[in-house]
Image (spheres, coloured by chain):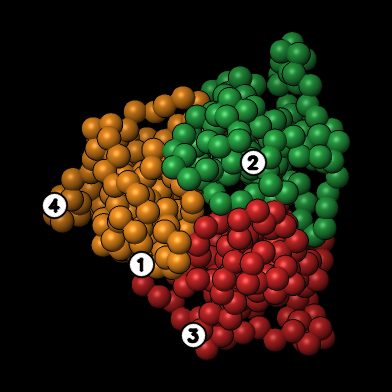
Chain colours: A red, B orange, C green
């Protein structure tokens, strides 16, 4: 089970960020769970700011993307009670704040994708779009949104 | 009911924009309705152009985002016959044309999110991604796409 | 049937690109098939690089978008066995690498949309979001992701 695997891997999920304003971290629709765009945060501060390809290296971008994915799992667990209810990852959207001429968004996005496959195995393999954007909230370097399939979803 | 509430709130939806080309304003898929990206329009003209953080203020961006959400509801009503068939808002994607260094995309996006919750209440609370992009169609400052849950959807 | 129509139209799909890393070209979720973001490729090389509105013309951008859509169909066929299982196109996301001041993303996106309607007719009409982004993977001019409805999907 996923929760057991997380423990075995020694992966601790971050504290789920408190919901802000009118949007919520996770919205269930049938058996799909839509997770809001996550930027890499810790204790209310952005962990990684700037443009990948300039002040942020590819490796730092990957680390930021991985962090976003962990946060996505943290809010999913909060919503579902347990990640064992996650049946797979469907789609991952990765937005990379990109310096002019930077074209390695897929490498950055692998920071999120690899983590999801590490945790969910075959079920974690997902469709993905990775694009380079001009600016992200609070100057973040990466933002990740995703859709998961869940058991016992509601309408 | 939503239609009654709209009347009580004194919110009038704009005239739905005519479909253009090969894409359509709303596509039903099961009980999900996908609404195409809306830019703030009135009588064939873009209401708000430029970059938020430069010639467009946060408040103006919020107003533009709210307008986009109203337009999304207008095309949903046109497709469904009545907004009373909308059972909730699932996901909102907000693209903000952003000046260099602008990081308040979430505040801009609240213009759309707050309206949706004002109208649909708890059911209007949605997952969201807000990102800053380089350029939007016709120079628009904001674009909003969304997924709603509907009753009596078709396959 | 779609496969017959493709033959009649003389449209040959490109060879589906090999899956890379942890994401996959197509992910089924119920009766929706999520296709990963496609950039225009041929034999491992990007066919169209640069910014639309600068080194890339609108016509070239349209051609690139059409190519992306063909690649999306190629990976769908690979996943499903036959495009006859595709019941329609639900949503198309078009990301256009845009020069400053370029606002004709919808025209570029029509390269993808028109192809999908040419092939699938009414069922090919889809919701769409077209935005201008700063940078795309490998310097590509256009990226297209989509959701299709399929028969005989799995959970």
Instruction: For marks 1 and 2, give the CA distance.
Output: 32 Å
Which quadrant of the view contains residue A33?
bottom right
Q: Residues within 10 Å of mark 1 (few under 14, many from 20)?
A: some
Residue A70: x percent and y percent?
66, 76
Q: Residues within 10 Å of mark 3 (few under 14, many from 20)?
A: few
Q: Is residue C81 left or right of residue C28?
A: right
Question: C70 or B89, which is in the foreground?
Answer: C70
Residue B62 seen in the current view = no
Instruction: For marks 3 and 1, give the CA distance.
Output: 16 Å
Instruction: For marks 4 and 3, give the CA distance.
Output: 38 Å
Pointers 2 and 4 in contact (C-beta within 8 Å): no
Task: Tell me whether marks 3 and 1 sit on the same chain.
Answer: no
Residue at left 47%, top 58%? B132
Pointers 1 and 2 in contact (C-beta within 8 Å): no
Point out which mark residue B107 bears. 1
Task: Tell me whether marks 4 and 3 sit on the same chain.
Answer: no
Instruction: For marks 4 and 1, give the CA distance.
Output: 24 Å
Q: Is residue A133 left or right of residue A114?
A: left
Question: C99 or B66, which is in the foreground?
Answer: C99
C5 over B57 or under it: above or below? above
Question: C109 or C122, which is in the foreground?
Answer: C109
Which quadrant of the view contains residue B121?
bottom left
Point out which mark residue C50 bears. 2
Residue under label 4: B10
- Of tags 4 and 3, which is closer to the observer? 3
């Amino acid at each position: 089970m996923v929760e057991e695997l997380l423990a075995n891997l020694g992966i601790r999920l971050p504290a789920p960020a408190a919901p802000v304003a009118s949007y919520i971290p996770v919205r269930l629709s049938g058996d799909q769970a839509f997770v809001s765009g996550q930027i890499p945060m810790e204790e209310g501060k952005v962990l990684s700011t700037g443009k990948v390809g300039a002040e942020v290296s590819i490796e730092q971008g990957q680390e930021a993307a991985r962090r976003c994915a962990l946060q996505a799992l943290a809010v999913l667990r909060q919503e579902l009670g347990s990640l064992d209810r996650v049946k797979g990852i469907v789609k991952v959207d990765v937005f990379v704040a990109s310096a002019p001429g930077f074209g390695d968004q897929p490498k950055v996005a692998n920071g999120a994708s690899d983590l999801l496959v590490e945790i969910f195995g075959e079920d974690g393999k997902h469709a993905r779009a990775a694009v380079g954007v001009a600016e992200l909230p609070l100057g973040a370097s990466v933002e990740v949104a995703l859709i998961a399939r869940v058991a016992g979803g509601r309408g």
